[in-house]
Image (tube, grey):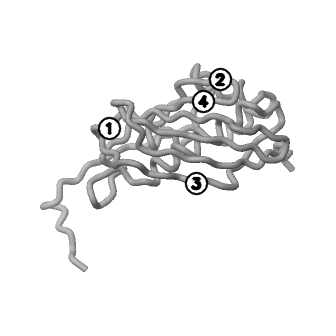
Amino acid sequence: MREVDETVERRRERTVRWQDPMALAAEIKGRSGREVLEALLRGELPPPPFTDLLSIQVTGVGDGEVEFTCTPDESMYNPIGAVHGGVVCTLLDSVIGCAVHTTLEAGLIYTSIDLQVSYLRAVTTSSAPLVATGRVTKPGRRVAFATGEVRDRRGSLVASGSGSCLVMPIAESP
């Protein structure tokens, strides 16, 4: 393997800060999924740490649907000079799951159990902002289904997906 001389490489830095994710987990217990997402949208609840890491923001909440934006930077690039597909996949997983979350009563949460993603075009920093929407196609008491899409700043579809989520009660702390 080739050794990298850091004096030759142009190093960049990114500082990541986040709030205690367990504080957010405690705050959601008495709220419906839609109430949680609306509170995140208004800035009344701290965002989950991964959203700051990936520059994702909640920008819209409705019954069975959500909209998020993502502004990728070059820290998310893969070796071929494009945003890593995992970022777009995470964005789709998030809007699909959160769309389902908007349909859940207080005391219920979800977890992804299936996700299918189709990538349609490359994403770079010039694609930003990305707008992702998620919509529930079939709500359920145990399993719910939703779809998602990600569009670039020009409105071109860059990826689409579908998934299912397991609906379950929030576990009580021991």
Residue sitting nearer the eye, 111 or 123: 123
Local packing at callout 4 (Cα closer than 10 Å; few below 14, some 14-19, many 20+) is many
Q: Amino acid at mark 4?
A: Val
Label 1 SS: helix
- Marks 2 and 1, Cα distance to the nearest angstrom? 26 Å
Residue sitting nearer the eye, 158 or 125: 158
> Residue at coordinates 74% horizontally, 39% vertically from top-left?
138
Question: Circle 1 is placed at which residue position?
Answer: 127
Mark 1 and mark 4 lie on one chain; the one further toward the N terminus is: 4
Question: Circle 3 is placed at which residue position?
Answer: 116
- Numbered tag placed on residue 66 in the rendering: 4
Residue 117 lies left or right of residue 124; in this view the side is right
Q: Amino acid at mark 3?
A: Gln
- Marks 4 and 3, Cα distance to the nearest angstrom? 18 Å
Mark 4 and mark 3 lie on one chain; the one further toward the N terminus is: 4
- Marks 3 and 1, Cα distance to the nearest angstrom? 22 Å
Mark 3 and mark 1 lie on one chain; the one further toward the N terminus is: 3
Question: Circle 2 is placed at which residue position?
Answer: 62
Q: Residue 20: horizontal and vertical position, in percent? A: 61, 40
- Marks 2 and 4, Cα distance to the nearest angstrom? 6 Å
